[in-house]
Amino acid sequence: MPEFDSVIRSTRTVVPGGIRPVSVGVRDGRIEAVRPYSAAMSTGEVVDLGDTALLPGAVDLGTGVHAPGEELAESYRRMGEAALRGGVTCAVVAPAPGRPAITCADSLQVHQRAAAGAEVSVFFLGGVTHGTSPLDLTDLHAGGVVAFQGSLSDGGAPDMAALGDAHLRKTMAEIATLNGLLLVHAEDARELGSPPVSADQRPPRAERRGLERVIAAARVAGARTHVAPFTAAECAALLAAAGSVGVGLTAHTCPHYLCLPSEFPGPGSAVHGCRPPLRSDANRKALWSSLLEPDSPIRTVGSGHLPAIGLYTLEWSLSALWTAARRRGRSLADLARWTAQEPADLVGLSGRGRVEEGYDADLVAFEDQVTVAVPHQDPSPYAGMRLTGRVRRTWVAGRASRPGPHQR
């Protein structure tokens, strides 16, 4: 009998501590061994990637799924296919917008059943709104949500109303008793213009005011809190200062905020519907500076995929992020940390996010030197761009995916 179901070799494997030439032995969907590249290993299948990089599969935090007018199960199937093409092996699904919103145990079960056909692993965030009770939080936690999500404005509209300060503090206290995590869309509704559909009507001060509210509430309640998404670079100092007053506050951003200034996409691009909006090129550069600070509180980067507004980003987010990161001298280890290790650690997915013995065999073969032209008709905000980096192959629990149109 072979010792391993398969062995995957790469001279450039991202492992804890750096990039090494190793062979990864997979058995029953898990990484059973990480050995030297040339090690003799008894196996039924060897995949030798040569110099193609091997990364941990991305854990996409806050993935939107439900497309308007589409059956929920079909939306999960399509999301899974797009995720695999983009090197995402695990989606942590946002509670809204969607039908039904994941705000109680019954709606969670509807999504769990619908997600059964997805080709990637799926976990869920529980939605928090003004009507959420302590019992709802407890039931969602018992049902398996890995964290909770709420908004101070219209981040989950129309399914999740904005939280006021009193309810925010109360919710944080309840989540703290569950040893849970709260993700917050931190734009303050009182600072938004009318109608709040453009960048001019959603100024950076809305994020600043929202951050101040979040910090004040978390300081009282003691809850772990993750601002998602964070875009206004002028608020980075406020975010970083939260730790000095005893608040465990971290943040999440998306590749389109890091790669696309508001001046770039055409007027018809769905990316203009983002909440918060794309900001200026100066903000984009400052956001990168904040991300690259030692011990930056911006810990996670995810696709921001949101079919509800026509924003399809899963396929290209890894390549877009790498294109910008390599220009700044960052390594594939940074890419894996932002997209896999930190998201998995944040929500407690202890067996994911690393190429390490005992972890799930969620892996991505990534051609980091290859230039890819995104088709002009692509529904993503990266349409027509030339990106560096292509997902060649993906494994979920050791099972290789079928190549998509961009995985050749």
Image: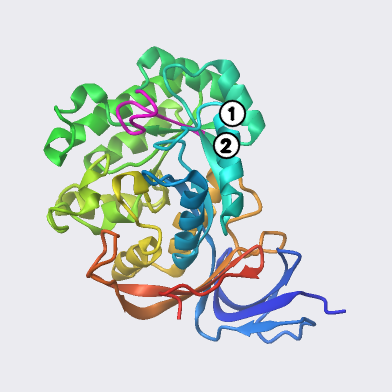
Q: Which mark is residue 110?
A: 2
Residue 345 colored in magenta in the image = no
Measure the alpha-carbon separation of dots 1 and 2.
Answer: 7 Å
**Type of the residue with mark 1:** Asp
Dot 1, crowdedness within 10 Å: few (<14), some or many (≥20)? Answer: some
Decide: few, some or many residues near mark 2? Use Cα within 10 Å; few <14, some 14-19, many ≥20. some
Q: Residue furthest right?
A: 1
**Residue 91: image tag:** none
Q: Position of residue 14 (x, y in %)?
A: 54, 69
Q: Which residues are magenta?
A: 148-161
Screen quadrant of the N terminus = bottom right
Compared to 130, does 238 lie above or below? below
Q: Position of residue 296 (x, y in %)?
A: 39, 47
x 42%, y 36%: residue: 96
Residue sitting at x 80%, y 82%: 42
Q: Position of residue 88 (x, y in %)?
A: 49, 60
Query: What is the secondary structure assignment of the residue under circle 2?
Result: helix
Please count the marks in the image: 2
Q: Give the dominant element type of the magenta stretch: helix, strand or loop.
A: loop
Which element is circle 1 on? Answer: helix
Identify whether 362 is placed above or below 307.
Answer: below
Q: x, y (%) of residue 113?
A: 61, 43
> Which disc, if any, is residue 106?
1
Which residue is depicted at the point 46% across and 47% down? 61
